[in-house]
Amino acid sequence: MTCPCSVSRYRWLRQFCSLLCAIIGCCSLPAGRAQSPGIEKPLLNIDDDISAFAFAPDGRIVYSVRHKFHTKQYDLERDDIWLQESGGRRRRLLQGEKFVRGSSPFSYIIDSFRWSPNGRLILTQLFTTSVIDERGATQDSIMTLALEDNGKEIRLGGNDSLLKDAYDASWLMDNATIVYLTEIVKPKVLFSFKYVNTTAGPNGHVFEGRTFLDASPIPRTNLAIGVERDRNLTGPPRLQRLELLAQDDRELATLDGYEGGVSVAPSGKKVAYYIDKEVLEVRDLTDLNKIARLRIGFGTFQWSPDETRILLKRAPEKKSGDLVWIEIPALTTHAAQDKEPPVTQPAFIPIFHGLTFRDFAITPDGKLAVIAPGKRNLLVFPLPR
């Protein structure tokens, strides 16, 4: 069989073909470049045009599949939502074409999913485009849809299952309260917290009157690490420990800057965030003066299960980039009055021979899930070293 890589002139196509060849075994790698475990054959291949996915605590996978269709006036897109059970059976939870709100035409693409702690409820973030007048003018917005894992919509507070203007929504430990960010200063500059309960009353404010640049939940708690900044953007960003149910908070540190990407480690004992477009800062949440700074360039990252490394996609979210491991150096003590901590230049350890991926996730049981450019299959491999 002729290897498609041998006739491809384009870099992105060569990369995709290389992954295809590694999976189906139609070509071999040059001598001296041994394949990483799992490259020859993925543990799982969901063969569809996937836009987003998330793993439940028990290993089930919720994912969205692009679905385009035509009406008399418009070409629309509304992603379908599917669930893959642990045994491999797949079933559709939501057919996008039949998901209707009001009489105005609209499209949506699913950005992300988030499971409840008990693994029975799902929050789905939608990027929507709606027709708003007879001339065909459109308006974009972010919404969050609440579903049970059987596909039944959850009427939040007895009302609609859709939360308008709801970013990064997450479940609290009661599996009934949803906390989310809503935009205060556009575009996506400052947010405030709001909450809604699946059974009780309308939504309300959390930390009313305060504004935040970003936040990341602490796993298996009702806590989050937030980056607060005043509404006029005059003061410095401040790292805060937030008790979302009781609405208590504790200031942890004043940051030299904040560019994005705040992420709490799986143990809840460390946090990492970009202080500018090049430098990632890692801070010990149990000893706040212990930090490290790494010059790695801006991208999307996740913690390794043992928290000694991060896996970095060297591209913004939803853009394709290669995946590299970065070792986290020992965190050292730097008091607030000290000089700025030194910035280290870590080694970049590539995986999958530099192939690019649109999305990735380290699964709860320590595997690596990736979506390649092109057809966007979901592939799951053992986590490369």
Image (tube, rainbow, N blue to C red):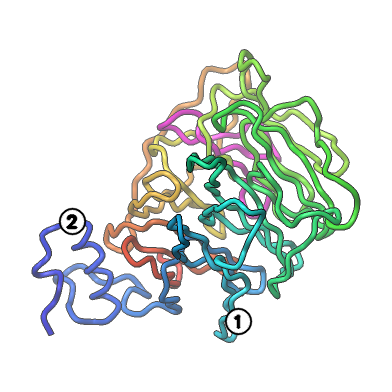
Q: Write the residue at 85% across / 35% down.
A: 248
Label 1 to label 2: alpha-carbon separation: 36 Å
> Is there a contact, CB below 8 Å, between mark 1 and mark 2?
no
Relative placement, left or right, of 221 versus 138 is right
Q: Write the residue at 79% across / 44% down.
A: 195
Q: For residue 290, what is the image quadrant?
A: top right
Which residue lies most toward the right here? 200
The secondary element bearing badge 2 is classed as helix
Q: Write the residue at 76% across / 55% down.
A: 160
Q: Which residues are magenta?
A: 264-291
Relative placement, left or right, of 4 versus 145 is left
Between 220 and 2, the one nearer to me in the picture: 2
Between 124 and 285, the one nearer to me in the picture: 124
How far across and down, in percent of the image, does residue 153 sit?
Answer: 73, 65
Residue type of the residue flagged with mark 1: Ser
Q: Which mark is residue 86?
A: 1
How far across and down, in percent of the image, does residue 40 sit?
Answer: 31, 78
How far across and down, in percent of the image, does residue 137 sit?
Answer: 49, 39
Quarter of the picture containing the C terminus is bottom left
Say if 55 sits above or below 243 in the image.
Answer: below
Residue under label 2: 11
Q: Write the residue at 60% across / 24% down.
A: 255
